[in-house]
Image (tube, rainbow, N blue to C red):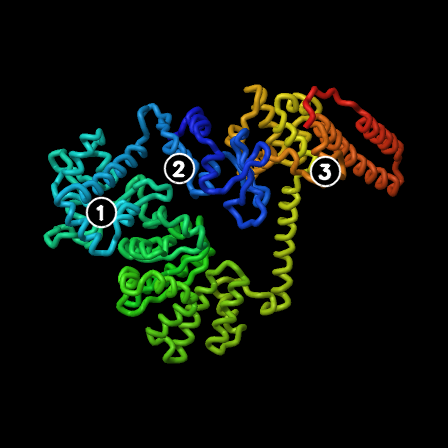
Amino acid sequence: MRIPDDKIQEIRNATDIVEYIGTFVKLKKRGKSYLGLCPFHSEKTPSFNVSPDKGMYYCFGCSRGGDVIKFVMEWEKASYVEAIEILAERAGITIVRTEESDQSASETEKLYSACTFAARSFNKNMMKTEEGAFALKYFQSRGFSDKTITTFGLGYSLRAWDSLVKGAGEEGIKPEYLEKVGLARKRDDGGYYDAFRGRAMFPIFSTTGRVIAFGARKLYDDDSIQGKYINSSETPIYHKSKVLYGIYQAKEAIREKDSVVLVEGYADLISVFQSGTHNVVASSGTALTVEQIQLISRYTKTVIFVYDADSAGVSAMIRGIDLILENNLDVRIAALPEGEDPDSFVKNKGGDAFEEALSKAVTFIDFKASALASEGKFNSPEGKAEAVRTLVQSIAKIKDPLKQTFFIKDVAEKYKLYESALISELEKFTRKVPDRYLSPAAQRDRGKELTAKDAKSAKEATLLEIPLEEKELLSVAFEEPAQMIPFIFTYIHPDEFSHPYTKEIAQLLIDEFDSKGAVDVNHLTTRASKEEVRKLISELSFTPYQLGSRWEKVGARLSETRTSDRAEGAIKRMKKKVLEHELAENQQRMKDASLSGEETVQFLQRHQEIFKSLKEIEKAQLAKPGVNER
């Protein structure tokens, strides 16, 4: 369901962009803006600007920019709707989506509300009831501190059949919503009963910190439900394959360390987190999925598997390793001593020992070779060939050719094989091998492919080269819209902009100004057709003087020039460029006519007309509006 535009604008207006971004970035006031080190790339000299007047941010180092909603999307790795919800919750604004069938609140919001209520109820059960004290003692026996219990929102579901259903009803939460999130089940008589009873409860959070599901651990021997751990079923807000347990608590540490530690279960993760390793997530006992890897890639490109020597999931881990490699992430494996899992290891050895084990993580080559050796694959020539072929097959999943080369070299040295033999195997899986191993004919074919790719890249690069005067003209329009937009577009039509991005922005400016008599940059970005255009809007609206010394070659020093003079210079330059291009074409046509013996008089006449027009542009004094000196 769509969130109304006026509600989005209300949320923007209620959020002080400097205050919000300042909680993540140390900002210092400089003029009308605030400056700090960019949170999205490493830099030593601050280039990240936040403008409270425009409600925008922009980094001159990595070209990321936008409004506060865009910042939340970038920082939290959230969707557009999730970002709006985060800001709305922070500002205490209720979001009402537009849909005739449900005017009060969205279906999704009701499901989130049901999960949030359940999480609070479970925690209250554990902390405030005599029955729940048993669950609290269980968590404490696992070594979980009060702080850890609070951090992960741990709780307990009462043994009564309908404790949660009744409590939810008192809060106005209908039982059908509990059913939809897997917390209640419907009886034959139409009534409802609790799905989880007498179990230790582990809330599962989304990346933005909303409760979306639960894991439940068996506590009583007479629990009739099979399985020590059971999870919520799939729901509209919980898709198991797309979620990692602990991601919300771990995401900042993952960013900071630029790596993620992957363990198997809830208790493993919580113990490791409490021991000091905060960049840890759990797959909750499921095989790693592409969606989970994509989730990890939002925060880091390096995965460290923690391998329990007694684990029965070695083959599943190997499949997960290949999946990680296919998705362009790096992976290492940290082995624990036999008989230890992450939970027991940190309890017995401590957090420092666990960090040391992580530091000794091996490459996927060494791990797979060890696993294959334990299966006896290296006991015969045939087995060795099969094992090495398996290693090469994993290397083939790596997309970076340079990394492939180093891993092939590593395997060749380890097993005293020729690189060329391994490359031949690699070709079977990738059909791509280094040039030095190709025949002359194959090298020529690849050369043609690369030439075509280079031509395409050159075309794309040309597309990205926006003329300086077009950027300057739009920058001036953003700086003084009330005076400059009517002035600029009296002399320049959007179709005269040569670059598709600047042409689109010019038309957006005209439409926005015609309809409102002003320009709202935030609204403009939402109407842009693609991300590149939105980035350019952020840049141009933020940087009236950032075009720098390049512009001095074709005009005056920006910092000493009135806005209207800068606009006039850019208009003249655009007009002159069109004529200069026509002059070059006319010159070529005149040359062709002369070589073929045709009449050239008309070309000479046009030549003179173009020269005259160029001189007129140079001398012209445009009717500029009165603007204060900048």
Q: How far apart in space, not on screen, are marks 1 and 2 (Cα)?
A: 25 Å
Q: How far apart in space, not on screen, are marks 3 and 1 (Cα)?
A: 63 Å
Q: Amino acid at mark 2?
A: Glu
- Quadrant location of residue 62? top right
In the rendered image, is residue 142 in sight? yes
Residue at left offset 68%, top offset 22%? 627
Image quadrant where one finds the N terminus: top left
Look at mark 3 in the image and give the residue it sits on: 551
Q: Amino acid at mark 1?
A: Met
- Closer to the camera in the image, 561 or 240: 561
Numbered disc 2: secondary structure:
helix
Indicate which label's residue lies in the foreground, 2 or 3: 3
Residue at left offset 42%, top offset 52%? 254
Look at mark 1 in the image and give the residue it sits on: 201
Sequence order check: which comes first, mark 3 or mark 1? 1
Q: Amino acid at mark 3?
A: Trp
Indicate which label's residue lies in the foreground, 1 or 2: 1
Using residue 479 as the reference point, say whether residue 613 is left or right of it. right
Using residue 560 as the reference point, say whether residue 284 is left or right of it. left
Q: Which mark is residue 82?
A: 2
